[in-house]
Amino acid sequence: MKYFYIPLLLALLLPGTSNAQNARAEHQSKYQMNTSRAQTPILVDGDLSEPDWQTASTTSNFSMKWPRDGGPAPYQTTVRSIYSDQFLYIGITAIDSTPNHVIQSLKRDVGYWDSDGVAVVLDPLNNAANGYFFGTSANGVQTEGLIATGTDDMDRNWDNTWWVETKQYDTYWTAEFAIPLRILRYKAGQNAWGINIIRNDLGNGIYSTWSNVPFQFDGLDLGWTGLLNWEQPPRPVKGNYNIIPYLSGGVTRDYEGKNEWTPDGAAGLDAKIGIGSGLNLDVTINPDFSQIEIDEQVVNLTRFDVQLPEKRTFFLENADIFGNFGIPPIRPFFSRRIGLNEDGIPATIYGGLRLTGNIDANTRIGALSMQTKGENNNTQNYSAASFNRRVFGRSTVAGYFLNREQFNGSELQKNAYSRNAGLETSYISTDGQWQGWLTHHRSFQPGVTNKNWWSNWGGMYTNRNFNVLIDMLHMGENYVADLGFETRIRNYDFLRDTVIKLGYNFLFSSSNYRIFPKKATSKLNFIELGAELFQVLNPDKTLNESSNAVGAEFNFKNTSSVSVNINPNYANVPVSFKFDGKPNEECPPLPAGEYRFTNASVEWSSDYRKRFFVGLNAQAGQFYNGEIYTGGFELNWRFKTLMNLRLAATYNRLAFPAPYCDVDFVNITPRIEVFFAKNIWWTTFIQYNNQADNFNINSRFQWRFRPMSDLFVVYTDNYGVNIPGIKNRALVAKVNYWF
């Protein structure tokens, strides 16, 4: 711990903060647009011929973002803005070379980046910390999300009511946005907001932005917005609340338990309430997640658990305020743990509260409390609190506290708790080229006082051609993430049927170098060369694992790509392990010890703009004391805007010397999507996975009969694979209404 504060001091003393702030102000001085008050009511129909649109000031001069940055976009986009007491309106005219647009889906929040479209990025506080995304395809399919500094992508799970319509012409198309001010968080009296406009010109394979964003940064990066200047600062809008009750009913049958059909029904509600100008209170009572799409099954060829994504709606919105602590392999908070008992079986959630948002321009907070039903009259309460404070421009200091308490009835059970706390600091230069971070995390369990913490520190530099990252970590063997995800501490020994707990240290580093062809006629966009080093050390500093990769990716102008990788590995495995899932008497586990093995992989994907496109992958070489051969494909066919068909399959063969057993894993996942209209969809997802011993059919019909109000009908079947036979079956209907 004595070295913990050294990186903290370095992070706080990093130079150039004031210069970076001045650089952002200089950038925004070059990109400014004005919004004026509308004099008449605006009809949102995609037609920009109304007098208010015609007299509004315009801006264009969009710059190339991808596949090359800088220079004017060959097909330009014009933007204008007006407002009323209730709405911010954005009108966009997109010049096009063809009326045949690329539209991947008619389903909301799906396929936006792979479709022709335009999007508005808003930063109402203009602090490059948090923002909003409103996008539409050329056919008017909506996508919205929340943007947070330090994340690679927006949170698309934020849903709200806003309007957009598009209209097609021979050489251009238009989009008319109406964004209610009540769904935004902004400061009264502030007349300059951060804004950017992103244009997807898929027909020509080009992305462009109004405020120029360098190639190495995401177009969503709030550090590169321009300014939206209001004629008069918008006034706060009252009435920011939504009530969403639901009713559900259905029948289920457990064939393995030889049960008969069982009817079931439920009712509950969610509520979203705006508090002041910056906070949201979310309430859920008796939540029901029957309409949520099932997990996509994967084949696991590692010795560790796989982290499947959270899909339950209540936990997704503003999830970054709790879930972004830690690093991808170690998350102190992982919401999928809420609502599961110790054996991983789902438990009833009675209800919960979540408060998130900004208390001022620089401070964001979150608080969460959920109550679940356990066994034998036991209940669990899960609570979380976090804060994120912006310092030195775009840098942050953030912290969290997590708590799980067990009750028997209403009586608190002593020594049945689990707690975690942590503090993180990060430095991000305003231009985003330099980043540094330092974290410290502790768990608190009854009777545990040492080796119960972990910490990591690292940094990253990126420019147009080159980026390099390094991260170091120490993990104590007694750290427990009861509300989180961590896989390496507990090592199960198949031969002795016991778990060995081991702390570890690791070093991860990666570097990439991009080569851009000099000739404009080249079929290549760029070549990216990369290398990764991942080394895990035991507490005694001996090497536990070394997993490395070197490779190259070739990215083509027609959006196809091919990549090759060579992966040299070393593993000093502390326990016996296996991949076959069979009894030890039939197939003995691989012994603990040292393994050196190297394999190679290749991937290719075709032009995804086409109605039919393909992806192929293969891997071959050594694998521990045996060999590995894998192959997979993905076929996609898009029938106009009416249907999407996808067939994906992988075959994995692990060949080991006697007396160990060979393993063959097959995973086949067809998917059918039918779009009756922009508000009526039917999706059928089929999965065959012999590793999970499951064949699943999930078919879901959704009708959005009014904004954010839906009717769902879901049918689910599960069958055995290794031992054929039906496991269970269910049919559920659910309706929710957004007031």
Image (cartoon, rainbow, N blue to C red):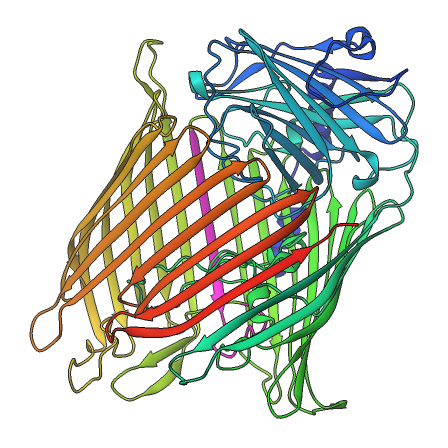
Which of 358 and 377 lies nearest the eye of the viewer?
377
Which of 483 and 715 lies nearest the eye of the viewer?
715
Above or below, comparing residue 707 to residue 279 in the picture: above
Above or below, comparing residue 385 to residue 208 in the picture: below
**Image quadrant containing the N terminus:** bottom right
Which of 665 and 266 lies nearest the eye of the viewer?
266
Percent across and percent down for residue 146 are 66, 42
When asked about the image quadrant of residue 259, the answer is: bottom left
Q: In the rendered image, is residue 542 in sight?
A: no
Percent across and percent down for residue 524 are 31, 20
Report the residue at 75% width, 28% height from top: 178
Q: Which residues fall within the magenta stretch?
A: 466-484
Relative to residue 9, is residue 363 drawn left or right? right
Report the residue at 25% width, 52% height from top: 650
Q: In the image, is residue 122 part of the stretch drawn in magenta?
A: no
Relative to residue 539, is residue 603 drawn left or right? left
Report the residue at 21% width, 70% height from top: 594
Percent across and percent down for residue 5 are 63, 59
Q: In the rendered image, is residue 91 in sight?
A: yes
Relative to residue 319, is residue 302 drawn left or right? left
Which of 663 and 548 lies nearest the eye of the viewer?
663
Above or below, comparing residue 67 to residue 54 in the picture: below
Above or below, comparing residue 91 to residue 444 in the picture: above
Q: In the image, is residue 483 part of the stretch drawn in magenta?
A: yes
When asked about the image quadrant of residue 728, the answer is: bottom left
Percent across and percent down for residue 31 are 70, 16
